[in-house]
């Protein structure tokens, strides 16, 4: 009985990996920015990109979109900030994101830590500077739970929201990584089926399910963070659904559409 259950689980695991490949997600392939987007991934710490956003990064880089990464701290909670900064650059090489397109902040008011509250207005200002400097038209970040509930992740989300509210006149797409419950979080590629259903049931164009077409690259990228590559993170990357699939949801899509329509009427 147990052997049959294990065999069924292994079959479902690999079937989930195979099922997605014939599909062609519609993310960033319609509209005036269809050919090539300047996308900005906004994260809190070095290794967030490899642990949580690798399917999104792989999707963007493999389809010719111009990806920039803004990391808002060096992750110095354990005094390894300089090391972690260099590790992030190496991980981004694995993801084929050039070093000059990766920016790591070390602001005194944006220090890594569970008890460190980050000012949303300060975050908004930093994000705005990066958007203007890079000609960004797509911003991607955490949702309001931030996958793990880490306060720095959540502050990054609200920093992006503050930026969007203060720059309503700009036509910028903004997407958030959907957080899942603990069962889905550790279901590996099997979560693809639930994520796909979530995307299908969402209003048209408001959510997209991106499967990682090269999960091995995620392991290689995360291993570049050698100061963090301890046994429990190895297990996390192996079993986390975020290694295999990302669900991106539009941030206030309807509100932005309505705001744009009102501007056009004026």
Image (cartoon, rainbow, N blue to C red):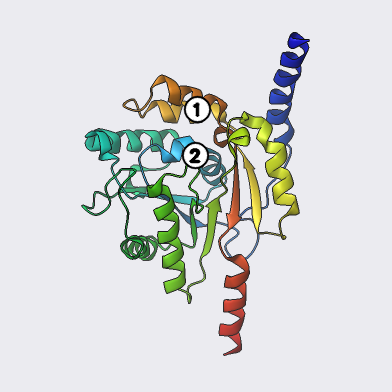
- From the image, tell me which residue sits under label 1: 236
Q: Within 10 Å of the Cα at label 2, are there few (<14), some (14-19), or many (20+) other Cα atoms?
A: many
Q: Residue furthest front?
A: 115
Q: Report the front residue among 56 and 165.
A: 165
Q: Report the front residue among 182 and 15.
A: 182
Give percent across and percent down for residue 58: 53, 40
Position of 53 relative to 221 (above/below):
below
Give percent across and percent down for residue 178: 57, 48
The structure residue drawn at horizontal position 39% and vertical position 36%, both measured from the top left corner, is: 47
Position of 13 relative to 6 (above/below):
below
- From the image, tell me which residue sits under label 2: 52
**3 relative position to 99: left or right:** right
Give percent across and percent down for residue 227: 31, 26
Quarter where residue 94 is shown = top left
Task: Identify the secondary structure beneath mark 2.
Answer: helix
Position of 29 relative to 46 (above/below):
below
Evaluate whether residue 96 shows in this view: no
Q: Residue furthest bottom?
A: 266
């Amino acid at each position: 009985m147990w052997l049959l259950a294990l065999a069924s689980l292994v079959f479902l695991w690999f079937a989930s990996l195979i099922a997605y490949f014939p599909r062609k997600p519609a993310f960033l392939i319609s509209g005036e920015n269809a050919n090539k987007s300047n996308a900005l991934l906004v994260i809190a710490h070095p290794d967030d990109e490899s642990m949580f956003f690798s399917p999104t990064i792989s999707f963007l880089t493999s389809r010719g979109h111009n990806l920039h990464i803004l990391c808002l701290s060096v992750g110095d909670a354990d005094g390894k900030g300089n090391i972690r900064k260099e590790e992030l650059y190496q991980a981004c090489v694995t993801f084929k994101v050039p070093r000059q397109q990766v920016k790591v902040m070390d602001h005194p008011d944006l220090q890594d830590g569970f008890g460190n509250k980050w000012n949303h207005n300060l975050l908004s200002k930093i994000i705005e500077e990066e958007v203007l400097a890079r000609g960004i038209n797509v911003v991607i970040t955490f949702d309001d739970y931030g996958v793990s509930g880490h306060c720095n992740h959540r502050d990054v989300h609200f920093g992006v929201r503050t930026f969007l509210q203060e720059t309503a006149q700009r036509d910028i797409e903004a997407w958030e990584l959907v957080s899942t419950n603990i069962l889905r979080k550790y279901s590996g590629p099997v979560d693809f089926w639930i994520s796909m259903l979530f995307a299908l049931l969402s209003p048209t164009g408001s959510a997209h399910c991106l499967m990682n077409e090269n999960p091995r690259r995620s392991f290689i990228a995360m291993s570049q963070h050698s100061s963090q590559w301890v046994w429990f993170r190895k297990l996390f990357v192996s079993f986390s659904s975020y290694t295999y699939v990302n669900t991106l949801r539009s941030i206030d899509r309807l509100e932005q559409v309505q705001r744009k329509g009102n501007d056009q009427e004026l």
